[in-house]
Amino acid sequence: MKRSSILGRKEKAEYCARLSALLPLLRDKMGMTQEELGRVSGVSRVTISQIESGRSMMNWLHFTALMMVFTSDRNVKELLYVKDLLDYRLLLFYQISLQEPEINVYAEPMKLDG
């Protein structure tokens, strides 16, 4: 199934509007200022401020960048599920597993001989 058939322009605009309304709450839950969120997401502080105040509309690029940050925190990710922002259609669009990934990370740098 093509991604474009999963979410159309109208659905993307609805997701953006819903995230815009929750942006101050989610940012607060992350314990971030607008500037800090901007720095880690790549969305400027000015844009975040304008979206939060309703002076600017969020676009799909902003949505995606902000969701990458918000889904990195387990508590915020759960809130996104509860608020129905991280639903099956969006997960299918991004092809994200519903399970936490199992990642083996070696804590110390490996030394290579030779």
Image (cartoon, rainbow, N blue to C red):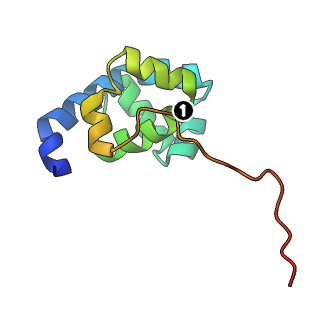
User: Is residue 90 rendered to the left or right of residue 4?
Assistant: right
User: Is residue 29 rendered to the left or right of residue 18?
Assistant: right
Q: Quadrant of residue 43?
A: top left
Q: Is residue 59 above or below residue 107?
A: above
- The residue lying at 24 percent from left, 33 percent from top is 89
Sort mark 1 into few (<14), some (14-19) or many (20+) by Cα contacts within 10 Å. Answer: many
Q: Is residue 114 above or below residue 104?
A: below
Residue 37 in percent (x, y) is at: 55, 37
Residue, disc 1: 34
Residue 66 in percent (x, y) is at: 44, 38
Between 1 and 85, the residue placed more toward the observer is 1
Q: Is residue 16 above or below residue 65?
A: above
Between 8 and 74, the residue placed more toward the observer is 74
Q: Is residue 84 visible?
A: yes
User: Is residue 15 rendered to the left or right of residue 102?
Assistant: left
Q: Which quadrant, please, contains the C terminus?
A: bottom right
- The residue lying at 62 percent from left, 24 percent from top is 31
Q: Quadrant of residue 51?
A: top left
Q: Secondary structure at mark 1?
A: helix
Q: Is residue 58 visible?
A: no
Residue 46 in percent (x, y) is at: 46, 39
Q: Is residue 60 above or below residue 23?
A: below
Q: Residue furthest bottom?
A: 114
Q: Quadrant of residue 113?
A: bottom right
Residue 60 in percent (x, y) is at: 28, 43
Q: Residue furthest top?
A: 82
- The residue lying at 31 percent from left, 29 percent from top is 55
Amino acid marked by disc 1: Gln
